[in-house]
Structure formats: C-alpha cells, structure tokens
Image (tube, helix red, strand yellow):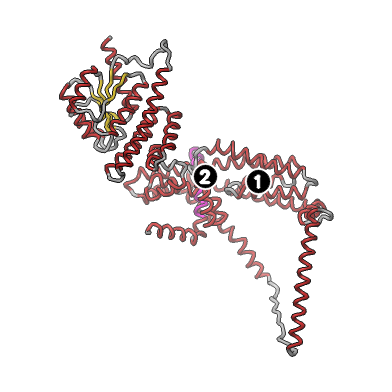
Amino acid sequence: MTRIAAGLLVIAGLYLAQSVLIPIAIAILLSFLLAPVADGLERFYLPRIASVILVGVLSLTLITGVASLLVTQAYEVADSLPKYRQNIEERMRFFTGDEPGGVIDKATKTIKKARKEVADENKRKQQQQAAAESDAEPADDGPLSVVIHDPPPTGLDLLRTYAGTILGPVGQAALVFLFVIFMLFQREDLRDRLIRLMGPDRLDVATGAIDDAGSRISRYLLMQLIINVTYGLPVAIGLWLFGLPGALLWGLLAALLRFIPFLGPWLAASMPIVLSLAVFEGWYWPLGVIGLFVALELFSNNVVEPWLYGSSTGLSPMGVILAVVFWSALWGLVGLAVAIPLTVCLVVAGRYLPQFEFFTILLSRDPALTSAERFYQRLLAGDQEEAEDLAHDHLERHGLMSLYDRVMVPALHLAERNRHAGQLSADKVQSILEVMTAIVEDMGERQERTLDSHKPGDSPPSTNNDYVVLCLPARDAADELTAIMFAQVLRATGVTVETGSMRALSGEVVARVDATATALVCVSALPPGAVSHARYLCLRLASHDASLPILVGLWDVTGNLERMSARLTEAGANQVVTTFEDGVDRVRRRLSSLARISD
C-alpha cells in the first residue's frame, strides 16, 4: 500500500507541476539530440561556451526559418482558396445533402418533413394548452424583462486577452531554450550529480543506466528525425506533382506531426486530403492524394521504421500504447510527443534499479519469462501438449544441447528447488517428472532414428567410439534424468555412452565400472544438494580406483563454483562443469587424448 500511495503521489505531482516539468522534459530530450552536435564542435577545439552558443543560435535559426516558412505557406494557401469557391460550394452541397435530386437530398428532405410534422403537432398542442390556461386564469401583465449589455472591449482589454494567449507559449519556448543551454553547458556536471543521487557505492550501476538511457533516447530521436524527413519530403514532392496548393507546407507539417505517436500521421494526412477535395474537381485526384499517404505510411511503417529503429527503444507494442495513453492523459498533446522517450528512461532504470523493475517487466520488449520458466510454468499448469510444443520448437531452432542446457535442465532445477522448499506436492512432482521423462525419451527415439538413417559408408561424427563413457546419477530421479540427457548429447557427437540407475547400490555401480572398462565416469547432480550427493559418489568411486577419471556435472548450479570444485576435487573428481556444452567439450578432449596415447 505504501508503494501505491507513493505512486499516486508522484502522478499527482507530475500533473500539478506540469507547467514546470513539461519545459524541463522537452529540454532534456532536445539536449540528448543536440549534445552530439556540441561534442562534435568541441572536437574542433571550440571552447565549451562557444560550441553551446553556436548550437543554440543554429537551433533558433532553424526553428525560426521553419516557422516563417510555415506561416508564409499557410498565407499562400489561404489566398488561393477563393479561386476554388465554386468547387468548394459543390463539395459542401454534396456532403451536406443540398445537391438536388440525389439520394442524400431525398433522405434529407424526408427527415426534415417528418421533423416538421412532429414540431407542428407539438406546437398545436402547446397552443391549445396555453389557450385553456388563459381562459381559466385572470390576465396578468407579469414582470418586465431586463437585458444587460456588456460595454464594448477597450484596447487595453484586447491587449490583455491576446497578450496572455501569445505570451504563454512564447514564455514556455523561452524557458525550454534556457534549460537546453544550461543543460548543454553543464552536461557532465548534471550527469555526475545524477550518479551521486543513486549512491556513491553504485557508480557502476548508475553509469550503466545513464549511458544506456542516453544512447537509446539519442538513437530514437535521431532515427525519428530521419524517418520524419524521409516521410515529409516525398509528401511535399508528391503533392507538388498533383498540383495541390501549399505542397511544401503539408510536407513540413507531415514531418513535424509524425513526432506525435498515432495521432500525428492522421493529422498530417487529413489536412491535404480535405484541401484536395476542395481544390480538385471530380474524385480522381483526391483519391490519388489518399493513395499517396497510404503508400508512404505502409512503406514507412513496414520498411523504414523496422530497419532504422530495430530494438533501439526496447519497448513492447503494448508498452508503447500504455505510455502514449498515460502521458497524453497527464500532459495532453505535449505528453503524447514525449511519451516514448520518457518511458524509455523508466524501462532502462528498471534494468539497473530494483525499485523500477516493475516498468521493465510491464513495458519492455524483453520476454517476461525465460524459455525455462515458460516450460516449467506449462508443466505446473498440467499443459503437457504446450510444454512438448515449446520443447520441440526450441529443438528445431537451437538444437538438442541448447534445449537441455537452456530449457529442460533449468526447468527441472526449478521443480527440485520448489520440491525441497515444500511448495510442490508429491503428485505434482511425479507428474512433472513423467512429462519431462516422456519428452527426453522422445528425443532419444529421434536420435536413434537419425543414427540408423546413416549409410554404412558414412563417416562417423567422432573417432572416440572405442571408449565407453558411463553417466551416473548422483542420487535421485532428477539426477538420473539429467544423466540421460547428457548421455544423449554425448551420443549425438559419436561417443559411446552408457547410463546408470539411481536405484543401483554403490557396490553395483563399482562393479559396472569394472565390467565396462570405463574410460570416464560422468556424475550428474542437480541442485539443491548437488555437491554433497556428487561428493559421496566420487568418494566411493575413488576409493575403489584412484586413477579413474571422474567428471562431475553440477548442472545449472549458482554460487561459489571454485569452492564447490575444491570440495569435489578432494573427493576424487578430476573436473567440474555446469553446462552440457562445457561437459561435452571436456569429454571429447579426454577421449581425444586417450586416442593419441593409444596410437
């Protein structure tokens, strides 16, 4: 409840202080966009103050030039409209239903006639009721009506009204410009102060978060600028070829309005389309203008934006929608324009600071669950079919070793951890093991069919077939299942492998080692309790034959691996690995060295 109250308080503060926070937010975004330009000027040995002033002057010149061009073009369009008065009147008659003889005209007349009949009937009833009341009551002159007229506004009133309307945006723009200049001039100092706020003992985390957010926002703004220019330029050229008045105006507006997500492109397209209906006779050219915007939108959304954006923002599609809705509801049209960059900052903060992890989970493009967690969740839900689909899909895309290393072994580890914590019933554990065993057996059958499909003349994938590797479980069913998985991965590389059972007694295990002339023993152990279980088996094997090579697989283990390896080495283990990939590499190296010695 405390966090919810704090969140509501922050939202209220953002809303109430928007007159100050909006200029700061816009200034921060412009600083991200202009900082690389200032850095580039400083590389040419310009002093900091000179580079910042030059960037500010160039920015003001560009903004003033674009604004004056927009105003000039708007006046030209307004001056040209009287030439199309007749066509505009015809369009208005068509859309308002005033065109005689048409379907709209007939429907409009029918509706008007029905409304007139109803109005006449109501008026007749009111007159009858009023006449009856006047006969029943004596005449009364009633009160006199008084009308108050406001005096015409004076020049001072007009100045006060229009000055407030004009000076408000001008003052906001001046405040933004002032913030941008100071942020560019003291950008390193502001960065250091922000790092200090996160804590002096978290310099690495704070530096990573600031660098990540800065690079993502700078790239987003730069790519957005490139996309908007490559969109507005074809709009201006296309409308000029169509002969639409103010083609340059509509191209500039199209480029500027696309900074506003979702709403901007619609606004950019609606104005030229409406003007084309007023200017051109017939429907051919207006449909051509509509087709131009549709084609450019499709090309920009499906080709240019995926190519330039990539994953620069790190936001999911749902995250973009939520960001736009939230910030537009909070700050209006300005919030709509700054929604994406501000949300990117929150998502990046969640990657480095646990307090903001909520935003990363909810809004980022990253999967909410890993492949192993999704697989385990399906097992918990009893959805065997979807769990098998996930396993087979990962197998086709990444192979058997990746399936076991990244999906099934970590999922089995999660199940074992929950079992030891008492969070899973015995029936649920048994159900999970049965499903995973069925998937592993299916993988084994696929492997056998693949090996049988090789022709006798085909060369084997490995030359280590003369040596036998014995995979043994350290203790329980989970260890046995991982031993079978590791054996399948080894067999896929051409290694001759045999597996042991968790039900075998220690004496039976030792006897089997002697009977198979084992070149290497792989002890498979899964946390929790992996080290103690594997250590006990290593002691039994080493006490029987101290020269026996033992490889211990502590699958998906976390913690102090060096300390664990030391304990297992004392018990007789030669090597310790944590992944199937590393284990296969160690086994192949061992067998290759044995092959060279025998040669």
Q: Nearer the viewer, residue 504 or 71?
A: 504
Q: Which mark is residue 252?
A: 1
Chief secondary structure of the magenta span? helix
Q: Nearer the viewer, residue 81 or 159?
A: 81
Quadrant assignment, res 542: top left
Query: In this rendering, is residue 326 above or below 545?
Result: below
Disc nearer the start of the sequence (2/1): 1
Tell us which disc is closer to us: 2 or 1: 2
- Total number of numbered labels? 2
Q: Quadrant of the C terminus?
A: top left
Find the residue positioned furthest to the front. 427
Q: Which mark is residue 88?
A: none
Report crowding for label 2: few under 14, some 14 to 19, many 20 or more residues within 10 A (C-alpha). few
* Residue interval drawn in magenta: 23-43
Find the residue positioned furthest to the right. 101
Residue at point 49% right, 41% down? 39
Q: Is residue 281 visible?
A: yes
Q: Nearer the viewer, residue 167 or 375?
A: 375
Spot occupied by residue 335 in the image (x, y as percentages of width and height): 54, 53
- Looking at the rendered structure, the kind of residue marked 2 is Pro
Find the residue positioned furthest to the bottom. 138
Q: Is residue 37 magenta?
A: yes
Spot occupied by residue 512 in the image (x, y as percentages of width and height): 22, 21
Quadrant assignment, res 596: top left
Q: Quadrant of the N terminus?
A: bottom left
Q: Which residue is mark 2?
A: 317
Q: Is residue 30 visible?
A: no
Query: In this rendering, is residue 478 above or below 112?
Result: above
Per the image, label 2 sits on a secondary structure element best described as helix
Query: In this rendering, is residue 6 above or below 308?
Result: below
Q: Distance from label 2 to label 1 (Cα)?
A: 27 Å
- Looking at the rendered structure, the kind of residue marked 1 is Leu
